Image: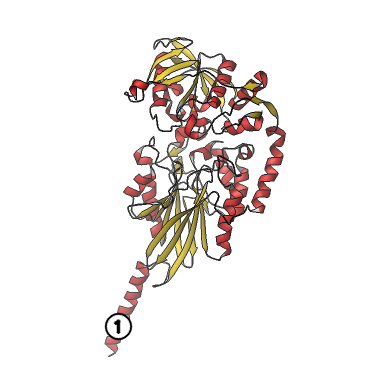
């Protein structure tokens, strides 16, 4: 009898060990509910706007109402938050850190535009944050650039592991000078390593927090979908970068992919249930205009104080517009607008260059008809770029136009806005012939002749894939791009219509 009891004891112990290995962190039959809130690509949109979202005070109330109910709440930001509007640009992202600290953000993955002040400033912001800023694939000298690659949160005994990823496109979707010495490794490789690490840490739920997206122009192996298709073990991927609104998410290889659009127009919500080692997740979306939410007073007070400090700069009147100047994403990345013409004209007149080519993706806001202020221009041109004149051959100009137009009619940040240049768009043609009938200085472009082309320092360094600009010699450098436009408006007083600078070849449709 004693022998039998001894064997039974051994069997019972082994059974308990196996159960513990199978269901780490929680007891059999126990169900744990976690509410995950996520947002991405706010781009400094801290207040509600006609083209923007609900504003961060309202977003905070969405989260706080759930916290007040006493449940388990997790808050994640998928990047591109610290730059975009003057209210955050003038303090280089510090306002966002203050808001996110008060909001109780649990983790963030930096987007490409979070490097816009230079990686050194991102490291300073990291020191101010009460939450980890994480990117497991971002390295310098073989070591992680940021302090943490991942973080682990525990809810009722359930361990949730979260790791960060940043898009390798950061190398040219911020000014390349901002990331000198920084390496962006393959996201899938880093993700696989993180899954192994977090499983070894006993995590029951694994969340990838990434700024990768799934844009058409993004290399397939650098997208979030590629990561999920090639890396097992991820339960949820909170994504950003491509500004997609995945209201109910998308299941890929057993994982839920979510993204909440952009400009805080939505707050994503994922209701997670963990029971006996099985993770279930359901995605929904709280949209701008949803009833039952109010602005959080504490966060609104932070914004109001910063706005007041900035008024000495932003409220200065500079001129008048007789038309609405359209700078919205879907327009400046697909065609000519009055806003784009104003900017390129100002640069062209200031520099006297043969032509101007600047990327539509650098134009970020609309100005309505009426009085214009410095603050308006700082919203339109938020990146702090300066004007550079490059020496380019006619062939290099043709190559640049073909590159910029290649995604048409899809929206593309590289879309070329021009001055002193006219061309015909043949968007069904081959990559070598997207544009034709190129005129510069009112004469046909000569591929063998050298020209001076003004652009912004982002493109001058090869940004947005304009590698020919990066290879060309610099003829001159000028001041801040926004200042060039401000001085132009102050001098001429009125902004209005401009001649059409490109046409779609209707026969090629």
Nearer-the-camera pick, 508 or 206: 508
Nearer-the-camera pick, 230 or 242: 242
Quarter of the figure with residue 137: top left
Could you tell me residue 46's position as x and y percent? 60, 44
Q: Is residue 294 visible?
A: yes
Residue ranking furthest to the bottom:
1
Could you tell me residue 244's position as x and y percent? 44, 44
Side (left or right) of 184 relative to 292: left
Count of picture labels: 1
Could you tell me residue 102's position as x and y percent? 62, 53
Quarter of the figure with residue 437: top left
Q: Is residue 230 visible?
A: no
Residue bearing the label numbered 1: 8
Could you tell me residue 462's position as x and y percent? 45, 26
Residue located 33% across and 22% down the image:
508
Compared to residue 28, the image places residue 58 above or below, namely above
Q: How is the image coloured?
A: secondary structure
Compared to residue 431, the image places residue 276 above or below, namely below
Residue located 67% across and 48% down the image:
302
Which part of the image, by quadrant, shows the C terminus? top left
Side (left or right) of 197 relative to 91: left
Q: How many neighbours does mark 1 have within 10 angstroms: few (below 14), some (14-19), or many (20 or more)? A: few
Which part of the image, by quadrant, shows the N terminus? bottom left
Secondary structure at badge 1 equals helix
């Amino acid at each position: 009898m004693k022998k039998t009891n001894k064997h039974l004891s051994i069997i019972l112990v082994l059974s308990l060990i196996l159960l513990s290995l199978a269901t780490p962190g929680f007891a059999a039959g126990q169900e744990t509910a976690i509410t995950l809130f996520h947002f991405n690509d706010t781009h400094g949109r801290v207040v509600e706007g006609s083209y923007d979202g609900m504003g961060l005070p309202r977003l905070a109330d969405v989260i706080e109402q759930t916290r007040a109910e006493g449940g388990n709440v997790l808050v994640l930001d998928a990047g591109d938050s610290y730059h975009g509007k003057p209210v955050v640009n003038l303090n280089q992202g510090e306002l966002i850190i203050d808001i996110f600290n008060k909001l109780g953000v649990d983790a963030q993955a930096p987007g490409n535009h979070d490097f816009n002040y230079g990686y050194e400033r991102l490291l300073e912001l990291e020191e101010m944050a009460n939450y980890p800023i994480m990117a497991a694939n971002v390295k310098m000298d073989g070591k992680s650039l940021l302090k943490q690659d991942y973080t682990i949160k525990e809810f009722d005994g359930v361990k949730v592991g979260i790791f960060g990823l940043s898009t390798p496109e950061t190398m040219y979707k911020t000014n390349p000078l901002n990331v000198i010495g920084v390496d962006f490794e393959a996201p899938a490789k880093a993700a696989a390593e993180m899954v192994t690490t977090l499983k070894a840490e006993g995590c029951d739920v694994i969340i990838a927090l990434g700024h990768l997206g799934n844009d058409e122009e993004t290399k397939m192996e650098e997208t979030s979908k590629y990561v999920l298709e090639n890396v097992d073990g991820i339960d949820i991927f909170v994504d950003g970068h491509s500004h997609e609104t995945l209201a109910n998410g998308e299941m890929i290889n057993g994982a839920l992919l979510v993204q909440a659009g952009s400009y805080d127009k939505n707050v994503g919500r994922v209701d997670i249930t963990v029971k006996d080692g099985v993770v279930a997740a359901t995605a929904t979306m709280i949209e701008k205009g949803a009833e039952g939410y109010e602005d959080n007073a504490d966060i609104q007070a932070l914004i109001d104080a910063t706005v007041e400090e900035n008024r000495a700069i932003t409220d200065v009147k500079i001129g008048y517009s007789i038309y609405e100047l359209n700078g919205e994403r879907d327009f400046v990345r697909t065609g000519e607008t009055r806003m784009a013409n104003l900017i390129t004209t100002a640069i062209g007149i200031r520099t006297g260059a043969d032509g101007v080519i600047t990327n539509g993706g650098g134009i970020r806001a609309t100005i309505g008809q009426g009085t214009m202020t410095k603050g308006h221009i700082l919203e339109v041109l938020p990146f702090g770029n300066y004007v550079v004149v490059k020496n380019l051959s006619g062939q290099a100009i043709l190559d640049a136009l073909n590159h910029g137009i290649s995604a048409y009619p899809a929206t593309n940040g590289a879309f070329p806005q021009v001055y002193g240049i006219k061309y015909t768009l043949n968007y069904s043609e081959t990559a070598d012939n997207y544009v034709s009938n190129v005129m510069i200085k009112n004469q046909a472009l000569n591929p063998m002749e050298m020209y001076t082309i003004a652009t912004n320092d982002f493109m001058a360094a090869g940004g947005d894939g304009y590698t020919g600009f990066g290879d060309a010699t610099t003829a001159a450098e000028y001041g801040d791009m926004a200042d060039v436009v401000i001085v132009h408006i102050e001098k001429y007083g009125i902004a209005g219509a401009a001649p059409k600078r490109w046409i779609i070849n209707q026969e090629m449709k």
